[in-house]
């Protein structure tokens, strides 16, 4: 089984108001070195696939289809092989 | 019958380790259980007794006082003891309402604490078979200059919004107050109002041998295990990092559960025997109370409980406070119709047990009996009669009323308007959807909110109120004032007050002074409720509101509902027409101890509370209601915190019109908080009729104008305020403080 | 005129829309998002709410509901498709309208009544409004910040597809956009709630002409 860790963020050109609010809060809390905050989404998806290439294709397909909105969001992901778990 | 699961203590270990004390059971309560069972209770049994006998579930400490509440009149269809109280509003319809507190969870995790508070009270309403139509919030926080308080305010507001907006029930009103006594112990009281056909009324009872217990809604996880005991324990800052008692709400799921439950009630009332939501002490409390109320027994097979996590023990399954779960009792043989209905909405609906006639509460797990106790005993915690003592602070209070410093009248007015308790809360209420369902007639910002009953001419007025500073100075009179003010709010819309729910927020009842406050507050609420004919039909008690031994002010939130027979007569607080005459109704006296101006100018409140005249209150309210029903008034606004000047300014701001006022009163009386007063505006054409009706009760103050200048002439001077500038202070002060 | 109001799991303005349509004499009914056919209807309304809890992104999961292929078919057949609030969000996620609704520029849910200007009077949604009319309509959303790339915006402007604009932009929407339609004019979405502004009792009737516009255009076309 494969584990995909998918990181979704806004495209750099899109204003991220939540990130901006967090940044100003951090500044208020005296973390003066903070330069930029962007808030994104993180998904862990376990999937079975014949090969790592097949898994990669699958992850790209469903991320494009559902997990992101291509108007504003972009993503990258890590894929690793994990042991099958016995689900109780 | 001494089954021991993995990792669970044996009955002997429970006895010897006294682990039950951590769960809130006293030694004598434990010994009572041993005597009644005639054996040692096992781990699961000890756990279920600790849950059921917690103050939060059993009200064992407050019940002797709560029994005194007056709760019957001709309208009452359901009084205290069920999920919510129900009142007859005519035409075969009924209004259902109740309040609930989520104080401790909101301190630990403000967003989820407040959100699940909304979810819980809505379940109480729709479990009675009623469609929730409105939510109101009564909130108390520390002062906004404290960063942690600001964090709590943000979280609580977002949590109420996050849940209420998503489930689609409008948050139509409520009130927010600030005082340092709440800084370590904020209050989050939520009131919900529902509407139903009387024919659809449901109660939480498990009648009929062999009938099935059906579990509906979210799966059970380990969230909130022993939350009931948690809410019944005093708060110490040491435990602030203990987050295990926090539950996470899912408004989407609750929306599905709500819609499906109401559909079931409408389509299958013939086969549904009872409905109860799973609130405090979860499955345990809902199932045992339903059986106890019906005088029956119950047997549950815990393996059938839908579970979100693996390897959950019977103790965890019973005490979990996972949200969005309901229990149905359905006639034997008819279960599939209910199960199908819920499954159609993609919800779990599973038979987990049955009603028996043996009076026992029996839990089975992995084909073994893991608990077997008498249900009456389990659901009736030993009552405690606690000592009371009049608080020492009340014995030595000055009889003299505070005299405000009004040497700079204009500045005093502006400073008062900027006080967080006075300033507009619109910037906070703006986060709540107050209009969804499209029935909101009077939105937040008025005296009371008003929601129409679609398809009729009727509307329901609703409000929450309490000024805890008054109760701190005099718990009995302060409680009377809380009920009176709530009623004035209702009356100012034109509606007739018809009933009360309460949220009694107090410190530790083990402190005789706090117990005295509770007793006096209930007596005060009763006294005015009877005169108004507004029975107390439901309520909630939250005790142990203390941080490091410091109790909050006694804060009995009064939630009141009123009935307006013709929504076209609805009256709001804003001035309407240039030239309308402005009157004050009621007498203005030296009433400054406990007032907003005393708090602002001295930093504290002190001295004997000013008086309350029951007869004057009733006659002021009668006058306003009569005048509105005869359509004599263009606006009506009750006088409360900040007194006459604040009420005048609010009527101006809301109406976007100014005033020219001339009064024989001395300057300080602009800030007096004498009860039983209103300001009203009367169109020229109605002045004669109004004056005849009012007689000595009303005094002409001046008239409504359309300039920016608000002119005010007192006995000693004339001042002019710019409406635009003054309103800016009123509108913006809260956001300035929140952004600090 | 026969209208369908789609009820997605989590929709909470479905009945508000149904009652509003019925108040204008429309033969309207609620249709579950689990249904797959919409052939009987002249107009289809996607109401406000929090479909699927607005989890993941607003409208992102709802667009995969069974009913959505029927909505797309109806749209292609030229039927009127109207998305209000969450309905607008679903239409953009489904690609039936361009752009996307993002988190408000100042994050947080806003419930208020805001002034709108009518940017295009010759639409099925605005033809009953007076030329000079500026209207006030309730808003209630946390994700109403309309975004589209510059090319799309240029196209929207050039084709007069912008139907309503905010007078005082409450949420950061580009070009103050409050409501848009597709090029053909039969698919429309807006964040404000006209269905909450049709009854004097609740204090606002500025939404009445929205419904009158739709009625007159359907009656003309059918």
Image (cartoon, helix red, strand yellow):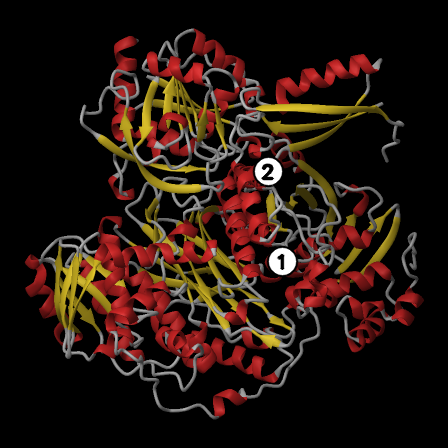
Nearer to the camera, B442 or A20: A20
Circle number at residue A36: 2
Mark 1 element type: helix
The correct choice, above or below, for B268 with respect to B619 in the image is: above
Residue located 70% across and 44% down the image: B212
Check disc 2: other Cα within 10 Å, few if <14, some if 14-19, many if 20+: few
Q: The residue marked by circle 2 belongs to what chain? A: A
Q: Look at the picture and state if B590 lies above or below B694.
A: below
Residue C32 left/right relative to B467 = right
Residue C67: image x %, image y %?
53, 18
Which circle marks residue B105 in the picture?
1
Q: Position of residue B410 (x, y in %)?
A: 24, 69
Q: Secondary structure at mark 2?
A: loop
Question: Which residue appears farthest toward the top when viewing the image?
Answer: C77
Q: Nearer the viewer, residue B54 or A53?
A: A53
Residue located at (70% from left, 70% from top): B381
Coordinates of residue B527 in the picture (x, y in percent)? 40, 77
**Residue B298 visible here:** no
Give me the chain letter of mark 1. B
Image disc number at residue B417: none
């Amino acid at each position: 089984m494969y584990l995909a860790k998918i990181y979704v963020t806004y495209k750099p050109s899109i204003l991220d108001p939540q990130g901006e609010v967090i940044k100003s809060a951090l500044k208020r809390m005296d973390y003066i070195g903070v330069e930029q905050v962007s808030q994104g989404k993180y998904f862990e998806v376990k999937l079975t696939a014949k090969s790592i290439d097949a898994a990669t294709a699958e992850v790209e397909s469903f991320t494009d289809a559902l997990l992101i909105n291509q108007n504003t969001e972009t993503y990258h992901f890590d894929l690793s092989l994990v042991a099958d778990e016995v689900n109780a | 019958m001494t089954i021991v699961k993995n990792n669970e203590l044996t009955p002997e270990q429970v006895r010897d380790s006294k682990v039950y004390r951590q769960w809130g059971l006293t030694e004598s309560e434990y010994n009572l259980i041993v005597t009644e069972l005639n054996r040692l209770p096992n781990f699961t049994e000890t756990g279920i007794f600790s849950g059921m006998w917690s103050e939060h579930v059993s009200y064992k400490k407050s019940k002797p006082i709560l029994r005194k509440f007056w709760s019957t009149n001709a309208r009452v269809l359901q009084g205290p003891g069920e999920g919510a109280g129900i009142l007859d509003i005519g035409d075969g319809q009924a209004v259902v309402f109740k309040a609930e507190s989520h104080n401790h969870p909101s301190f630990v995790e403000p967003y989820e604490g407040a959100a699940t508070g909304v979810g819980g009270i809505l379940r109480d309403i729709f479990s009675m078979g009623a469609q929730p139509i409105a939510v109101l919030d009564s909130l108390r926080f520390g002062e906004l200059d404290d960063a942690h308080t600001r964090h709590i305010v943000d979280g609580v507001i977002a949590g109420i919004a996050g849940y209420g907006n998503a489930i689609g029930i409008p948050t139509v009103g409520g009130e927010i107050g600030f005082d340092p006594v709440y800084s370590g112990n904020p209050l989050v009281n939520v009131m919900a109002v529902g509407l139903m056909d009387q024919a659809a009324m449901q109660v939480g009872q498990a009648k009929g041998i062999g009938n099935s217990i059906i579990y509906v809604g979210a799966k059970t996880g380990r969230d909130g295990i022993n939350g009931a005991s948690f809410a019944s324990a005093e708060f110490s800052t040491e435990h602030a990092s203990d987050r295990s008692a926090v539950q996470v709400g899912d408004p989407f799921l609750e929306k599905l559960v709500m819609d499906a439950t109401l559909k079931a009630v409408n389509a299958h009332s013939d086969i549904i025997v009872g409905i109860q939501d799973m609130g405090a002490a979860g499955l345990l409390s809902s199932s045992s109370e339903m059986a106890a109320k019906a005088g029956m027994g119950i047997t549950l097979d815990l393996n059938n409980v839908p579970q979100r996590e693996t390897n959950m023990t019977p103790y965890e399954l019973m005490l979990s406070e996972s949200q969005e779960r309901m229990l149905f009792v359905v006639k034997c043989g008819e279960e599939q119709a209910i199960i199908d209905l819920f499954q159609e909405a993609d919800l779990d609906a599973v038979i987990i047990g049955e009603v028996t006639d043996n009076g026992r509460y029996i839990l089975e797990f992995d084909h073994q009996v893991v608990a077997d106790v008498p249900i009456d005993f389990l659901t009736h915690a030993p009552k405690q009669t606690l000592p009371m003592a009049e608080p020492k602070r009340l014995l030595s209070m000055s009889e003299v009323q505070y005299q405000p410093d009004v040497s700079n009248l204009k500045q005093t007015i502006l400073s008062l308007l900027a006080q967080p308790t006075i300033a507009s809360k619109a910037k906070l209420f703006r986060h709540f959807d107050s209009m969804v369902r499209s029935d909101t007639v009077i939105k937040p910002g008025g005296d009371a909110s008003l929601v129409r009953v679609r398809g009729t001419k009727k509307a329901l007025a609703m409000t929450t109120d309490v000024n805890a500073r008054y109760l701190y100075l005099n718990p009995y009179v302060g409680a009377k004032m809380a009920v009176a003010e709530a009623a004035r709010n209702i009356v100012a819309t034109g509606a007739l007050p018809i009933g009360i729910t309460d949220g009694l927020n107090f410190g530790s009842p083990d402190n005789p002074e706090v117990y005295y406050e509770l007793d006096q507050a209930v007596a005060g609420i009763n006294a005015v409720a009877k005169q108004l004919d507004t029975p107390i039909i439901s309520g909630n008690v939250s005790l142990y509101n203390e941080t490091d031994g410091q109790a909050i002010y006694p804060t009995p939130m009064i939630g009141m509902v009123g009935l307006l027979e013709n929504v076209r007569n609805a009256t709001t607080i804003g001035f309407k027409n240039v030239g309308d005459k402005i009157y004050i109704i009621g007498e203005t006296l030296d009433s400054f101890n406990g007032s907003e101006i005393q708090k602002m100018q001295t930093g504290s409140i002190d001295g004997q509370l000013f008086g309350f005249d029951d007869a004057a209150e009733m006659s002021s309210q009668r006058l306003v209601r009569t005048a509105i029903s005869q359509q004599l008034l263009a606006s009506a606004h009750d006088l409360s915190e900040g007194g006459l000047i604040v009420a005048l300014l609010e009527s101006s701001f809301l109406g976007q019109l100014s005033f020219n006022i001339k009064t024989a009163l001395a300057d300080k009386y602009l800030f007096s908080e004498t009860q039983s007063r209103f300001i009203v505006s009367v169109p020229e054409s109605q002045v004669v009729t109004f004056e005849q009706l009012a007689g000595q009760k009303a005094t002409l103050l001046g008239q409504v104008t359309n300039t920016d200048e608000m002119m005010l002439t007192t006995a000693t001077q004339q001042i002019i305020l710019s409406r635009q500038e003054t309103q800016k202070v009123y509108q913006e002060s809260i956001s300035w403080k929140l952004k600090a | 005129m026969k209208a369908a109001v789609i009820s997605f799991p989590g929709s909470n303005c479905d009945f508000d829309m149904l009652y509003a349509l019925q108040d204008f004499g429309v033969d309207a009914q609620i249709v579950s998002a689990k249904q797959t056919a919409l052939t009987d209807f002249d107009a289809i309304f996607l109401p406000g709410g929090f479909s699927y809890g607005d989890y993941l992104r607003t409208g992102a999961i709802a667009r995969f509901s069974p009913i959505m292929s029927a909505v797309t078919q109806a749209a292609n057949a030229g039927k009127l498709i109207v998305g209000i609030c969450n309905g607008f969000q679903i239409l953009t996620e489904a690609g039936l309208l361009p752009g996307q609704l993002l988190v408000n520029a100042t994050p947080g849910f806003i419930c208020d009544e805001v002034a709108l200007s009518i940017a295009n009077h010759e639409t099925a949604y605005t033809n009953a409004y007076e030329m000079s009319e500026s209207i006030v309509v309730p808003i209630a959303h946390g994700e109403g910040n309309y975004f589209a790339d510059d090319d799309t915006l240029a196209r929207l402007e050039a084709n007069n597809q912008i139907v309503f604009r905010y007078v005082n932009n409450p949420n950061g929407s580009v070009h103050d956009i409050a409501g848009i339609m597709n090029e053909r004019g039969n698919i429309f979405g807006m964040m404000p709630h006209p269905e909450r502004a049709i009854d004097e009792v609740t204090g606002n009737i500025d939404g009445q002409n929205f419904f009158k516009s739709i009625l007159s255009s359907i009656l003309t076309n059918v």
